[in-house]
Amino acid sequence: AALLTRRFAMSPFPTRALFPAFLLAVATTVAAEPLYDQDNGPISGIYNFVDSTEGATLLAKGRFGWSMSSITSSHAATDRRGDELIVLDGETTRAEFRLRYAPTARLELGLELPYVWHSEGHLDSLIDGWHDVFGLPGGSREIRATDILEYRYEDVTGERLNFIESTSGIGDLRLSAGWRLDNDPEHRRALRFAATLPTGNAGELNGVDAVTLGIGYAGDIGNATADGRLSLFYRLHATWIGEPALLPDTYNEWVGHLAGGFGYAATDWLELRAQVLARTATHDSDLIVLGEPSVTLSFGGNIRLGDRYTLSLSVGEDIKVESSPDVSFQLALRYRPPSD
């Protein structure tokens, strides 16, 4: 725990900015909300895909809500198959601000704007220890130097990506909407919609340089047990991608997401959560990280800070090795006004 605390304190600005709230949380007195589990890969992350927090529990009419989140992911993938070679070795930090508003009793609108850093990072030693303690496979970490930045892709046509210098910039702006299908407090359901606009820069791996559109179905189940402590959720989404600037000849036009998980209210201020998110392949490729589905396990918890604020902390692990970021650490602060 002390080591994780030191790593959060040393991490890039967005995580450090939320760190004081983490320290205050242990002294406070939980909303059943899924953890943030964005796809934060160097290539797949540019699409700004949906995550599990876009659910069926919408704001009440006339209410605003917002959140600030920071996710830092460590990448360690080296794969050669046929004429293709990919090396993903580095660290990506994504800070995001989200704003939501409900103009009617059934409609919720939202926008989110990310800021993305790619760097050599400082998490390799921590993650090596994490893998050793839990007996997890190290993959290419066992043969690569620590704390370097190299994102490289080659195919039969030659080198398509060679990214070795740290960079940062604004990502693509994402607009979202939720439409409430019913008012059952025990099993909420909603349709989800999204559109991503090309405000980022594909050359710096923080944007697509194209429009993406999304549609989905979300369900949130409260009071799944008699004592009301267990909550469940499920998500089904599809994203259409316009022609991207990066690898436009191999990308998949449609990408699907399936997610589910549970939360357990351990106390009146602490909710423990575990969830799984699966994504279909982003490219037509023989490589695992591009051409195969990804599966990520996230676990952590929500800490209630009064009746309006929630602090979320989580860790994500690629349980399908090298299909997504090796390990991700996430911290988020959410504001949700009391329900009417």
Image (spheres, grey):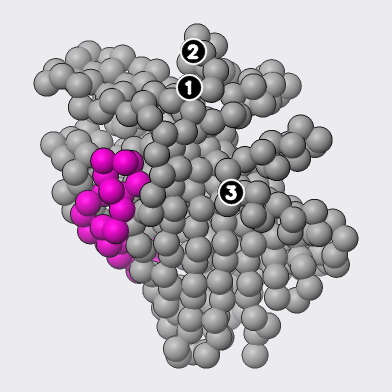
Q: Which residues are magenta?
A: 191-216
Residue 277: tell me if it is visible.
Answer: no
Quarter of the image holding residue 238? bottom left
SS for callout 2: loop
Q: Please report the residue visible at 34 percent of the width from the left and 38 percent of the height from the top.
A: 43
Label 3: few (<14), some (14–19) or many (≥20) C-alpha neighbours in 10 Å: some
Quarter of the image holding residue 149? top left
Mark closest to the chain's N terminus, 1 or 3:
3
Instruction: Tell me, yes or no, whether the two marked residues, 2 and 1, touch with CB atoms within 8 Å.
Output: yes
In the picture, measured across the screen, residue 195 lies left or right of residue 15, that is left
Q: Give residue 13's mark.
A: 3
Q: Please report the residue visible at 39 percent of the width from the left and 74 percent of the height from the top.
A: 177
In the picture, measured across the screen, residue 47 lies left or right of residue 338, that is left
Residue 235: tell me if it is visible.
Answer: yes
In the rendered image, residue 315, in percent from the top left (x then y), is placed at 63, 41
Q: Indicate the quadrant containing the N terminus: top left, top right, bottom left or bottom right.
A: top right
SS for callout 1: loop
Label 1: few (<14), some (14–19) or many (≥20) C-alpha neighbours in 10 Å: some
- In the rendered view, tell whether residue 254 sits above or below residue 193: above
Quarter of the image holding residue 292? top left
Mark closer to the observer (2, 3): 3
Question: Residue at label 2?
Answer: 144
Label 2: few (<14), some (14–19) or many (≥20) C-alpha neighbours in 10 Å: few
Q: Please report the residue visible at 49 percent of the width from the left and 75 percent of the height from the top.
A: 100
Q: Amino acid at mark 2?
A: Arg
Q: Indicate the quadrant containing the C terminus: top left, top right, bottom left or bottom right.
A: bottom right
- In the rendered view, tell whether residue 46 sits above or below residue 193: above
Q: Amino acid at mark 3?
A: Phe
Question: What whole-number distance in Å separates the C-alpha atoms at marks 2 and 1?
Answer: 9 Å
Q: Amino acid at mark 1?
A: Ile
Mark closest to the chain's N terminus, 2 or 3:
3
Q: Give residue 148's mark.
A: 1
